[in-house]
Image: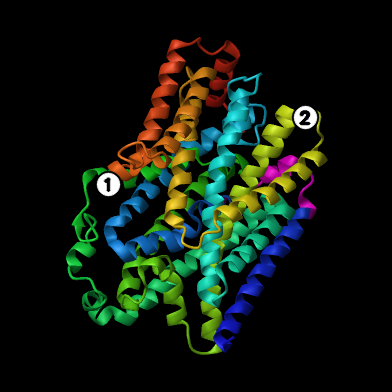
Amino acid sequence: MSGSTITILIAFACYLCLMIAIGIISMKKTKSTEDYFLGGRGLNSWVAALSAQASDMSGWLLMGLPGSIYAAGTGKAWIAIGLFIGTVLNWLLISKRLRRYTIIANNSLTLPEFFQNRYHDKKKILLGISSAVIVVFFLVYTASALASGGKLFHTVFNVDYHIALLIGAAVILTYTFLGGFLAVCTTDFIQGTLMLVGLLVVPIIAYALVSGDFMGALTASGISDTNSYMSLFYVNGEPYTFTQIISDLAWGFGYCGMPHILVRFMAVKSEKELKKSSVIAIIWVAISLFAACAIGVIGRAYLNATLSDSATETVFIAMIKQIFSNGFVLVFIGGIFLCGILAAVMSTADSQLLVCASSVSKDIYKNILDPKADDKKVLTISRITVIVISILAFLIAWDPNSSIMDLVSDAWAGLGSAFGPLVVCSLFWKRTNLPGAVAGILSGGLFVIIWDYLPIIKGQTCYAFTGVYSLLLGFFVSLLCIVIVSLITKAPEQGILDEFEKVNDYQE
């Protein structure tokens, strides 16, 4: 093992030890299920904002997005534009009302529990269906994060991918298992800060090193038409169609249906803190998405196309290793920036594990199977669930050739289509009823599975045949089902309508 590799390993060890220490400290503060799942609704503005955005972006931000732009050009940045718009709308329109409504709806701690309480679902149909959807799609989502970690360790330390996968999963499992929501949010705050610094510093330095002739460096990297490569309306040298652009922008629809992001809104200490959080989060995501896109373009020029087609998602790693390659201090700093990629991976995987744990232990076990279970037993079930979900996600991520972008895309579409329209209708349309809610979740989730996975058109999936992202259609299919079924079935009872009005008049 070379001296530079040992130095990077020291940086990783320091970082990982800090994360585990936070888990141990947080464990001492975790006394109840509300602490474990929502941190006692005591998050301040900075922790809530950076935790929400760090858990959102994952290894996709530092690997998947830059890699796609590196390979195909800036036309792939439409996804980032869609995500920015979705983030802004989520914080400005959803966050405050969701926090209020979850408090009024019997202090709901999870999204499935909110649906149950919102619609007075005594048979717990919504609880079971929504929990199942979360577990299914979060398995894929968590697998994408673990795959990112595996590729990181494999590229940096030349460790076998499967061993690297095991190392990353073990660390994430440890502090999530110990500290729950408080540990996850505290580590996410640190990870979000580290991600932002790395995203800003690395492309700026790389650009400075090639800025004398940036377009010339792009041409030397194998780009025959630099104008199309730098254009938002071309991908791989071909015009990007309107359908493809709309499909990329549709990623923004997913935000209002992401349980691991929405739960941060529910956990903020006060509406005053929530308002601060929205400003911090929007600024963070704007800078981060722009910088991630810049990494793809600048990395192409700086690295001179040294990456193979199968390694484009490691462009950020390659840039760091090349820039910070001489001397202990520089290599150690590079190691810290590489930890930023690990931070992106861990900040998403831990949140998804926790949401899965809450769905299984609180929503399914406590609320359906054993209503008399005490907090201690529910916490135990939660921690067992974290272990089981980690193992299953580990198996899904086992293939070293699995695409981070594809895994994230599938999970994002499934959750966004199943929950996004229902969250919006639950918060803003009082005529929505229980049958409509059930129809929305089932139609949205099933549509994505059929569209993305079943080869029903000439031996191809609908996505492969049309190129239309499933979330673009799935969101509106779900929304349409909610509206139609709600209107043709019995109106909500008066108690539900009264709670809806209480949200409008809520005062802290």
Tell me the residue at 42%/20% (across/down).
Answer: 483
Q: How is the image coloured?
A: rainbow
Quarter the N terminus occupies: bottom right
Q: What's under tag 1, amino acid-wise?
A: Gln
Does the magenta segment cover residue 458? no
Residue 21: x, y in percent?
Answer: 73, 64
Does the magenta segment cover residue 42? yes
Magenta: main secondary structure equals helix
Q: What's under tag 2, amino acid-wise?
A: Asp
Give the labeled residue for mark 1. 244
Label 2 residue SS: loop
Residue 283: x, y in percent?
Answer: 43, 55
For this orientation, the residue located farthest to the front is 459
Few, some or many C-alpha atoms within 10 Å of disc 1 (few <14, some 14-19, many ≥20)?
some
* Residue 47 appears in view: no
Camera-side residue: 170 or 270?
170
Q: Which residues are magenta?
A: 28-45
Is residue 357 toward the left or the right of residue 85 in the image?
Answer: right
Residue 185: x, y in percent?
Answer: 62, 53
Is residue 288 toward the left or the right of residue 298 in the image?
Answer: right
Circle on res. 370: 2
Q: Is residue 56 above or below residue 71?
A: above
